[in-house]
């Protein structure tokens, strides 16, 4: 079953995405901790798109799709901004971030820990970030 | 949405978080912690029992104060994290780098230890 939501690229709309993911996963046998982790991964990707790809332009929109399959769950975040290739993101070391007192840089680290596969697919109609979780 | 209140008692600034700390609201957590860092007067105890959700933006704020509070000799402890919120800290190994305890009583014992 595939469901979707569209939001304007504003960080304040992240809560709406989280509610959508929570309701999409409500009927799955996943635990509360697992559901929260999946919500977190999608939230992190959307936050990155809003901040980097759409550059916080509140007139732009992004779409989030959830496809519940037999053996996996596929999440897609699609935007029409300049794109943000997660696979090219350099993973920082945690202790370096702490020593530098930086306030960011761990979002994509979390996405990689939570999801089994992450694809970045640029296209003319929008950039697709596809996250796959085996269940 | 998040609501953050700070209560001062004895040698402790008790920061109570109620709601979600994400990319849109982490700035408020940052302000509350920064207030205590600037004052340098109180140990910092964060009540996370009504923290319903945290993303990397919130974790990043907490992480950035680990070294700061060491520098000012202010003790820094979080208590009352739900299982799902604690799991997010554990994914990054932050439970080993920060002091996370179950109850307010344990947090107060920690700040009053030598």
Image (cartoon, coloured by chain):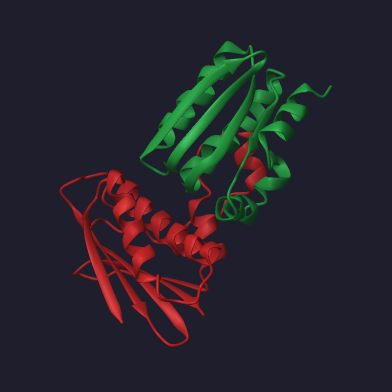
Chain colours: A red, B green
Q: Is residue A65 toward the left or the right of residue A95 in the image?
A: left
Q: Position of residue A50 (x, y in %)?
A: 30, 50
Residue located farthest toward the bottom when viewing the structure as drawn:
A70
Can residue A101 be spotted in the picture?
Answer: no
Provide residue B45's location: percent of width, then percent of height.
63, 28
B27 on left or right of A99? left
- The number of numbered discs placed on residues in the rendered structure image is 0
In the rendered image, the residue lying farthest to the left is A59
**A22 or A59: nearer the eye?**
A22
Q: Say which residue appears at 54% left-offset and 19% top-offset.
A: B7
| Quarter of the view holding residue A119 | bottom left
Q: In the displayed structure, would residue A35 be above or below residue B5?
A: below
Residue A121 visible in the displayed image: yes
Q: Position of residue B24 (x, y in %)?
A: 36, 40
Q: Residue at x 63, y 24 (%)?
A: B44
Which quadrant of the figure has residue A31?
Answer: bottom right
Image vertical order of residue B101 relative to residue A106, above or below: above
Q: Quadrant of residue B4?
A: top left
Residue at figure coordinates x 64%, y 38% from the top left:
B79
Q: Return the residue nearer the eye: B29 or A124.
A: B29
């Amino acid at each position: 079953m595939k469901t979707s939501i569209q939001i304007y690229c504003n960080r304040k709309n992240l809560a709406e995405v989280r509610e959508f993911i929570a309701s999409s996963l409500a009927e799955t046998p996943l635990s509360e901790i697992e559901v929260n982790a999946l919500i977190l991964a999608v939230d992190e990707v959307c936050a990155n798109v809003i901040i980097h790809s759409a550059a916080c332009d509140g007139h732009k929109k992004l779409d989030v799709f959830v496809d519940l399959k037999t053996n996996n769950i596929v999440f897609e975040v699609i935007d029409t901004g300049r794109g943000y290739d997660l696979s090219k993101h350099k993973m920082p070391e945690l202790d370096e971030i702490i020593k530098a007192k930086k306030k960011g840089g761990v979002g994509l680290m979390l996405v990689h820990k939570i999801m089994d596969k992450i694809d970045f697919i640029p296209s003319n109609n929008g950039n697709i970030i596809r996250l796959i979780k085996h269940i | 949405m998040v609501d953050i209140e700070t209560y001062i008692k004895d040698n402790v600034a008790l920061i109570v978080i109620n709601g979600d700390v994400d990319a849109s609201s982490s700035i408020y957590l940052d302000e509350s912690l920064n207030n205590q860092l600037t004052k340098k007067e109180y140990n910092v105890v964060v009540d996370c029992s009504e923290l319903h959700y945290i993303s990397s933006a919130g974790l990043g704020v907490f992480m950035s104060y680990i070294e700061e509070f060491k520098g000012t000799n202010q003790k820094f402890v979080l208590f009352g994290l739900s299982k799902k919120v604690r799991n997010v800290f554990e994914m990054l190994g932050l439970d080993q780098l920060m002091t996370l305890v179950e109850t307010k009583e344990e947090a107060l014992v920690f700040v009053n230890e030598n």
